[in-house]
Image (cartoon, helix red, strand yellow):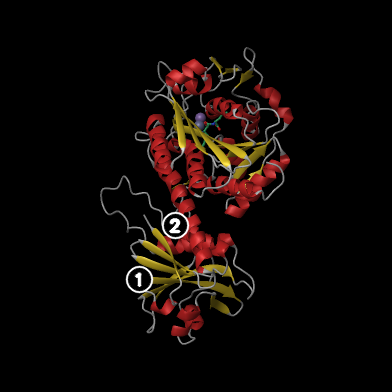
Amino acid sequence: MTALSVSTIPVASLPVDCIVIGAAKSTKGPVPAPGAEAVAEAFDGALAELLGTLGVTGAEGEVAKLPAPAGIRARLVLTVGLGDAANNNEEYDAETLRRAAGVAARTLAGTGTVALALPARTAEAVEAVAVGGLLGAYAFTAYRTTDHAAAPVRELAILANRVGRTDAEAAVRRAGVLGQELNRARDLVNTPANDLHPESFAAAVVSAGQEYGLAVEVLDEEAFAAGAFGGILGVGQGSARPPRLVRIAHTHPEAKASLAYVGKGITYDSGGISLKPVGANEIMKRDMAGAAAVFAAVLAVARLDLRVNVTGWLALAENMPSGSAVRPGDVLRMYGGRTVEVLNTDAEGRLVLADALVRAGEERPDAIVDVATLTAAMRFGLGNHLFGTMSNDDAFRDRVLAAASRAGERAWPMPLPAELRGSLDSRVADLANLGERMGGGLVAGLFLQEFVPAGTPWAHLDIAGPAFHEGEPNGYTPNGGTGCAVRTLVRLAQDTATGGHDGP
Ligand code: BES
Ligand code: MN
Ligand code: ZN
């Protein structure tokens, strides 16, 4: 795994393989960004012109490799585009820095040591560069038996000459925790369902809980039967791999608020008896991305020792068709006693989440957030880059949206129209798991809302689109699992811990 460090050594004498500098767009062509001064000097002031000759424009995502000039110890200089140049006293925004660092780290795979001399004049900017670098260096190689691609950068040094050493080190430490945990979520999403199933997922939580000193509790089939967790049991009953509900808790002695994070963890979603067609089922190992995000976020919160209590609930099941599978028309008795008629076994996420939401709600947290790859409808509505954010409380929803935006994630508010609720009425049970097709993402949100305790602020993040990136890598986003929602959940816990808002 890529190691992060802070460096305050003068750039010219850094003993690294490559120095990364920013190149920005200006009306006069490409210009080296702040942080690049020493490198520019070694080029005798001819760097901007050289970049122009090479066709560099400074556009975001652009990279150029140059042999380092005499007077620089490193052998290679990489420029990475930052887009429009910021004014002298203006900082580059955190997301621009994350992406630039991510592009650099990915481009430099195969390089041993890299120094990131990007414009980082505040602790927040240093953290952004470090997070972007660590996320961009990520590669999923667990199943490669040949040297398929160059190894990730071994060491990333963040140059922080303008930030005090203590502040810079604290920022890089935070970035290390966040980046490592987010990459853990990506690994879980990328792991195929023949290796990641409810039991092995639960075992991974137990082992991480032991490593970092968090309380972990695993409910199995016996506990489900005794406790009448009909949703999780019903969805899991068709699989040879039994379901689990995992509770992982971070508690802080001085916490003044508590959050419950609930994740959909369908380790494989075949659709069940309402089987998905070819084209829809081969991508369904990703259907546990919500649980992976919750797991990673709780670990990050614990490792950062945030002054807030955060409990993660992972609703883990494999949705398979078999002689023992739940059938369309079956009625399940959910945890808490409500009954649900299963009209479509492919609407399974809401069934496992309903049990988990009721169980999480019993502990009376100040707020609940669930995260789920819940509906194809949300992908049609918002595409693959934004997640939909629904809530029973506008102020809480705005806090979640603010946390997402600050953390560099694209979240968008979606409504829970009361007009759609009636479509979830069942002829035989309290509720049906299928309602109106139009606005299917919102209907799913309305279903979940039924299982949230009245008066508890709750937000539902439908990450069906952005949980997985199917195209070529960009910025710090690789192909495959993205780690979507981890940064939002961690930022929300940070905001809650520091009371940077009204209410819980
Ligand atoms: N896991 C899927 C949603 C999904 C689709 C996630 C594509 C990621 C990519 C979910 O369980 C599902 O099958 N939803 C159905 C619900 C429908 C039957 C009401 C859907 O959205 O089609
Ligand atoms: Mn499904
Ligand atoms: Zn699903």
In space, the residues marked 2 and 1 are separated at their CA atoms by 17 Å
Name the element at disc 2. helix
Q: Residue furthest front?
A: 253
**Left or right of 205, for residue 452:** right
Left or right of 446? Residue 152 is left
Can you name the residue that lies furthest to the left here? 146
Residue at horizontal 66 percent and vertical 19 percent from the top:
425
Coordinates of residue 200 in the picture (x, y in percent): 37, 33
Per the image, the residue denoted by label 1 is 17
Q: Amino acid at mark 2?
A: Leu
Q: Is mark 1 within 8 Å of ligand 1?
A: no
Q: How many marks?
A: 2
Q: Earlier in the sequence, mark 2 or mark 1?
A: 1
Residue 16 seen: yes
Badge 1 marks a residue whose secondary structure is: loop
Q: In front here: 329 or 101?
A: 101
The image quarter containing residue 241 is top left
Residue tagged 2: 134
Residue 87 in the image: x percent, y percent?
64, 74
Q: Residue furthest bottom?
A: 44
Q: Residue at x 50, y 24 (%)?
A: 232
Which is more toward the observer, 282 or 287?
Answer: 287
